[in-house]
Image (tube, grey):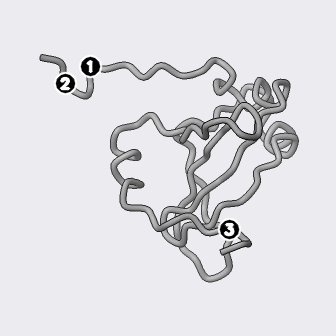
Amino acid sequence: METGAEIVSLWPRWTDSAGTMLAMNALVRSRCGTCGTLLRVELEDVVARFGPGHSLIDRLERCRMVGCIGSTFYLASRTYGREWTALLRDPALVTSFETAAPTRTALG
């Protein structure tokens, strides 16, 4: 019987780096686990700050919502209308965001 640690996640190659996602015109969002806020991520800015090889997988950032002290994780989609992939691989991170607040957008 396999344990969770022995199972290897298969990731689409286009999620490997910010530069690859930018070249593919992928969509990226950040989502806060505390307040649920969903924000657009500009890949041009990520590549300019960290370089094209920077990975967003298992990266956490501080929430940008005023008054929130939560952490955000990243989601990516190949294009509009496609499934969003949470860029979380670490089992501890996946577990910590399972009880995340419901997603909030400007529409409610």
In depth, the one of 61 and 36 nearer the eye is 36
Place residue 26 in its image quadrant.
top right
Q: On the image, numbered disc 3 is attached to which residue? A: 105
First-in-chain label (3 vs 2): 2
Q: Residues at badges 2 and 1 in contact (C-beta under 8 Å)?
A: yes
Q: Residue at x 40, y 37 (%)?
A: 90
Q: On the image, numbered disc 2 is attached to which residue? A: 3
**Number of marks in picture:** 3
Position in image of residue 63 (x %, y %)? 62, 66
Helix or strand or loop: what does disc 1 sit on?
A: helix
Helix or strand or loop: what does disc 3 sit on?
A: loop
Residue reaching furthest to the front: 81
Give the residue type at disc 2.
Thr
Position in image of residue 86 (x %, y %)? 54, 41
Image quadrant containing the N terminus: top left
Give the residue type at disc 1.
Glu
Position in image of residue 44 (x %, y %)? 87, 41
Say if 68 sits above or below 28 in the image: below
Place residue 80 in its image quadrant.
top right
